[in-house]
Amino acid sequence: MRKILLAILFCSLAMTASADTRAGEGPDPNFYIYLCFGQSNMEGNAKPEAVDLQYVDPRFKMLAARDFNSPARKTGEWYTATPPIVRPYDGQDIGLGMADYFGRTMVAALPPEVKVGVVDVAIGGIAIEGFMSEKIGAIVSKAEAWQKALIQAFGNDPYKRLVDMAKKAQQVGVIKGILLHQGCSNNGDQNWPNNVKTIYTRLLTDLNLKAEDVHLYAGETLRQEYGGSCYAHNTVIAKLPSVIPTSHVISSAGCEGNGKDPWHFCAMGYRIMGSRYAFAALEQLGMQPIADKDYQMDSSLKQFYEVKTLDIPDVVGAMPGNRSRIPVKAQYLDGHSEDVSMRATFTSDDIPFNGTIMLPTAEGTGTVEASYTDFCRHETRKTVGVEVKYFPFDEQNISKFSGTMTYDAANRTMKLSSGGVGGWSYNAGADMSAYKYLVVKLKEPQDLGTQVRLFNKNSVSSSSYKETIGDRTTVVINLHQMAYDNAGHTIDPSKIYIVAFRCTKAGTLNIDDVFLSNDTQYDAAGIDDVTTSDTTPSAIYTLGGQRATQGRLPAGVYVRGKKKVVAK
């Protein structure tokens, strides 16, 4: 009996010192620790589903940052990271959060000797200032009873609890990064990045860490298309890397909400977000976001990570001077889908690429070899045709710049409000200087006071060349004679950022075609169509019908009283 009791005591002590604490041996360099903090999405607001509970790799650990009663856990003890990680169930349908699939993805990708541990302190509804010890008192004094209870569980000082647990974790492992998901309680707060920087800097100082070794990963909030009410804060989160150079923004694109409130993700949303946090952390470690070649993945997890089919178009359109991606959508075995365009690879002898970005410089056609390797190391390839045009007429490439606009690609009709502006945008600047003319053809005359405008900046409020269409159906613009003021300043055709229509009156433009040309048939285009109420014999107009400025004319062809005039 004594031997049995001693054996039980030994096992108990071994479990307490588990998490591979290496008691007396110092920190394990192969035990990677990640600190996590934020509000309810980091806390875990979705009910874990069967796949989330079937298997958790014992190499994925959690350090309890508060006492639990369901399941039973004690502050400061290590456990296999089965949900819930942050707070007990307490009869609520919660428990799955950002850290769950972060850790599962990490251990699957890292070598078998590496373990991953999370230290997670998160509180529903808490502002970012709640992680500043000098401000938590004021927050507690104004908090509702339910939130006071959550804060109290972390000793009424969430930041101090995070630091205390982090120091305990440092006894057995090495802190490799910090995960943050917070923002709804600071929605749109422009000072939020600075407050995050303050907390991040304090953590580095208090834990004797270096920013270059411990990066910060901050996740976006639920997006507007999925019912998110804090989506505007994503523009604030986007500024974080400019304030903290060692920070990374984790996209929430494609992650659906729970359908019950405007703040929280569904279980699948948490899985996807967690894996994206992991992909970013793996890349920072110099690793590819794929499973270790020897990892034996549980069949239930494989449903989430393995791609069933890839949806890639047979042919895509592109524009010279416009950075764009080929869309690649993955359908997974469990039924969810993700846009993986930024993780695919592309090779082409015809189209220049910078990573995943197409950078065509001239019109033409070509092919691209697209490939994607999923987390389970399965590769799919497809050859994609690319058609490059300066003025494609598909809905994807027609932009609204101001006012309201609706566009029908099948009929090439553009319906604009009064003052509305719509057309084509070239985010890298299109070089049209090899061509002499821009030709615009309409299917029928219009009386909307429409102008064709060309811009050297990516803003319709900047200076532009303006060509009034009037009742013409063919408009020819000499790209090398685009003066936009009386001083003779011209638009540079080698750096065109926008070509657009602007209507003075609301109505519909029926567009036939828009193209660039060097054809000599357009040298005298518009001469017979020039109409003006100006009877001054010396009045001179461009071939497009716009009155030229006084003084020395730039070299080119002009019209004076229906006669062609050449300026040299």
Image: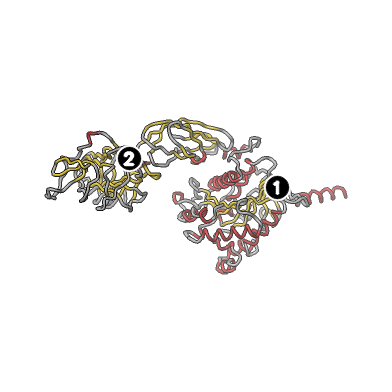
Closest to the observer, 6 or 137 = 137
Q: Secondary structure at mark 2?
A: loop
Instruction: Name the residue type under label 1.
Output: Pro
Question: Residue 464: x, y in percent?
Answer: 30, 50
Q: Earlier in the sequence, mark 2 or mark 1?
A: 1
Residue 43 seen in render: yes
Task: Give the label, 2 or 1, closer to the camera.
Answer: 2
Residue projecting furthest to the right = 2
Could you say which disc has been placed on residue 41 in the image?
none
Q: How is the image coloured?
A: secondary structure
How packed mark 1 is, by other alpha carbons closer than 10 Å (few <14, some 14-19, many 20 or more), is few
Residue 275 placement (x, y as % from top left): 57, 45
Q: Position of residue 12 (x, y in %)?
A: 78, 51
Return the residue nearer the eye: 47 or 340: 340
x, y percentage for residue 149? 61, 63
Q: Height in image: 195 above or below 309?
A: below
Residue 60 shown left or right of residue 381 in the figure: right
| Left/right of residue 216 with respect to residue 2 in the rendered view | left
What is the tally of numbered marks visible in this picture? 2
Looking at the rendered structure, the kind of residue marked 2 is Ser
* Occupied quadrant, residue 127: bottom right
Can you say whether 145 is above or below 50 in the image?
Answer: below
Q: Is residue 94 visible?
A: no
Instruction: Say which mark, if any, is on residue 29.
Output: 1
Badge 2 crowding class, 10 Å Cα cut-off, few under 14, some 14 to 19, many 20 or more, is: some
Name the quarter where the C terminus is drawn: top left
Task: Give the labeled residue for mark 2.
Answer: 433
Helix, strand or loop status at disc 1: loop
Nearer to me, 389 or 47: 389
Q: CA distance from mark 2 to mark 1?
A: 58 Å
